[in-house]
Amino acid sequence: MALSHDELWPRAGGWAAPAGRSDAVVLGVPAWRTSLSPTGSHATPSAVREALRRYSPTVLAPQPLDLSEALRIADAGDIDGPDGPEGEARVRSRVAELRAASDLVIALGGDNSITHPVALAAGATGLVTLDAHFDLRDGVSNGSPVRRLVEEGGLDPRRIVQIGIADFANSAAYARRAADWGITVITIDEVRRRGIDDVVAAALAVVGEGPVHLDIDVDVCDRSVAPGCPASVPGGLAAWELRSLVRGLASSTGLHSADVVEVDATADAADGRTVRLAALCVLELLAALAFRGRG
């Protein structure tokens, strides 16, 4: 269905390719081959771009602001064949290039395996994950990026915060690994007990001044709002909780890279609710960037 046109109601997305320095750049990383669950996540970057066109780039609070006017936003297209050692090398090379010419790189997955090459290339010294899972598995898959960043990338696990870890979605062995390594874990129940603002402040205090990478695994959300995430479960975060966490965490001047992952556009509900939520996470990242330092 064609979208309506109104000169006074511009649409988000449709950003041009990078040309010179950008405030933020979007990059598609359609990885899927090592996923532990069957997935069509390679179709998601293009689906998120299409969903962005359904939204306005205007933030209403704390003051009305058109993000496309306030920020220089670019879209660098997709990485071709991002899976495997050679694919990850291409991801690292491109992210490093884009990060050198922008304040924020937003990687559109694809599955969670992309967190490893993206965070590594961005030079992250701190990591926050919004995820129902620890992602500390052995091997190379969408269940192993956090372990790989520690063991292969040298990331200090004491500067990792995992928000939204869920009951019945993890094993005791990986919970012990997180505890042994000194990773800060904030469960879904704890998020709700403490509140968004307190959790954001605590997480940013742990990861330090940066560079920080934010991993937005949409399967942290309740399955009713994220049916297109293979591993989402009933009882996860509400959509508004995820969006609030993303904007709060991205308000830190130390956050320079992020990924939005684990959405299978081919398995979404008919109304595209999961892909649309992923697109809103992109806009929340941009909103936080735009308001940094504005008070």
Image (spheres, rainbow, N blue to C red):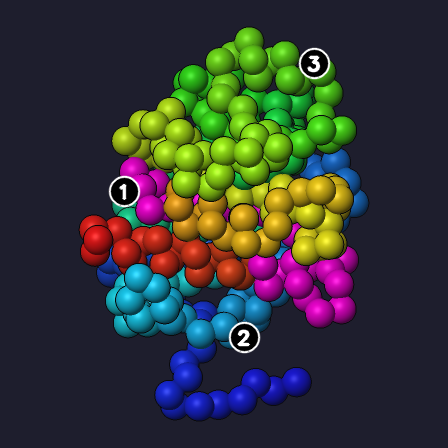
Tell me the SS state at disc 1: loop
Tell me the SS state at disc 3: helix
Residue 280 horizontal/vertical position (percent): 51, 60
- In this orientation, does residue 292 appear? yes
N-terminal label among 3 and 1: 3
Q: Residues within 10 Å of mark 1 (few under 14, many from 20)?
A: some
The residue that mark 1 highlights is 253
Question: Is residue 291 covered in magenta?
Answer: no
Q: Residue furthest top?
A: 180
The residue that mark 2 highlights is 54
Relative to 73, residue 89 above or below: above
Q: Residue furthest right?
A: 38
Q: Dots 2 and 1: beta carbons under 8 Å?
A: no
Residues at marks 2 and 3, CA–CA distance in whole angstroms? 43 Å
Which stretch did the figure color magenta? 250-277
Q: Quadrant of the N terminus?
A: bottom right
The residue that mark 3 highlights is 173
N-terminal label among 2 and 3: 2
Residues at marks 2 and 1, CA–CA distance in whole angstroms? 28 Å
In the image, what residue occupies the spot 36% across and 68% down?
60
In the image, what residue occupies the spot 24% across and 57% down?
21
Residue 19 horizontal/vertical position (percent): 29, 64
In the image, what residue occupies the spot 54% across and 48% down?
242
* Depth check, front residue: 195 or 142: 195
N-terminal label among 2 and 1: 2
In which quarter of the view is residue 36 placed?
top right
Q: Residues within 10 Å of mark 2 (few under 14, many from 20)?
A: some
